[in-house]
Image (tube, rainbow, N blue to C red):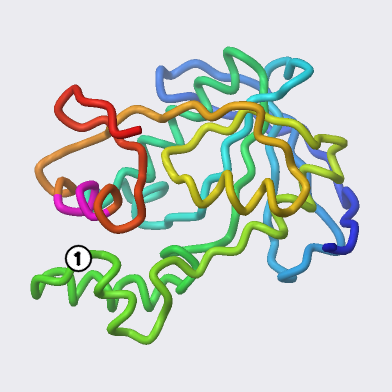
Amino acid sequence: MQPAASIRVTVQLPVRLADGTDTLAQSYSFNGLADGKEHVALRLGKPGPIPVVRLHSECLTGDVFGSLRCDCGPQLQEALSVLNEEGGYLLYLRQEGRGIGLYSKLDAYRLQEQGRDTYAANLELGHGVDDRDYTAAAQMLKALGITRIELVTNNPDKKQQLEQLGIEVARCRLTGVHANQHNLAYLKAKIDRTGHLLRMDGSDKE
């Protein structure tokens, strides 16, 4: 059983949404997270008894620079809009490149340019298919008093890990498909290699 974490600081954070409107989020930092990283949570809107929750792994290239090689930036913006409308929590997790770090992710991009898919590139660099661990995410939710959620994800591993860590996932909600000419192979690899529930070409992969 993971040790308990606690809320460190709570701060009001004005946030600009994708449609250009502003909203006010409550941001939280934490003490005692298992991996020692500076993860944060944002509460938007008025969460219900089963809050909507998005675990979003940091992606500097997609979230900040608008890279089209992945779907991270659009997923983040979509999540913020949904959470603001319905009420819920965004957990922003410092797990760049599925947990391999920024420089290793750029190394993986180089291998992808040579023909590897995103997972094969990580493996060739000596990493796992997906090195992310959601222990800290479960600690954060429990510190916020949350043990039952509606999870916004296409990734079945997130649901499985959270449930093993004592968070009940009452239901999952898929994100949209944010496809472009640069990330089609990336999205296909997520479906084929790790069973992501992405709806491509109007079909449901569930």
Q: Which residue shows up at 84% across the image and 39% down it?
A: 144
Magenta highlight: main SS: helix
Picture quadrant where residue 199 is located: top left
**Place of residue 120 in the rendered image (x, y in percent of width and height, measured from the top left):** 25, 73
Q: How many marks?
A: 1
Query: Is 121 rendered above or below residue 7?
Result: below
**Place of residue 12 in the rendered image (x, y in percent of width and height, measured from the top left):** 76, 32
Q: Residue furthest front?
A: 206
Is residue 72 one of those drawn in magenta? no
Q: Which residue shows up at 83% across the image and 63% down it?
A: 2
Looking at the image, which is closer to me, 88 or 153? 153
Picture quadrant where residue 133 is located: bottom right
Packing grade of label 1 (10 A; few <14, some 14-19, many >=20) is many
Query: Is 91 rendered above or below residue 109?
Result: above
Q: Which residue shows up at 29% across the image and 67% down it?
A: 119
Where does the C terminus fall, quadrant-wise?
A: top left
Looking at the image, which is closer to me, 132 or 96? 132
Residue bounds of the magenta highlight: 185-189
Task: Find disc 1 in the rendering and name its residue.
Answer: 117
Q: Amino acid at mark 1?
A: Asp
Q: Which residue shows up at 42% across the image and 71% down it?
A: 102
* Drawn side of residue 70 relative to residue 162, left or right: left
Picture quadrant where residue 125 is located: bottom left
Looking at the image, which is closer to me, 167 or 7? 167
**Place of residue 88 in the rendered image (x, y in percent of width and height, measured from the top left):** 67, 25
* Drawn side of residue 182 relative to residue 172, left or right: left
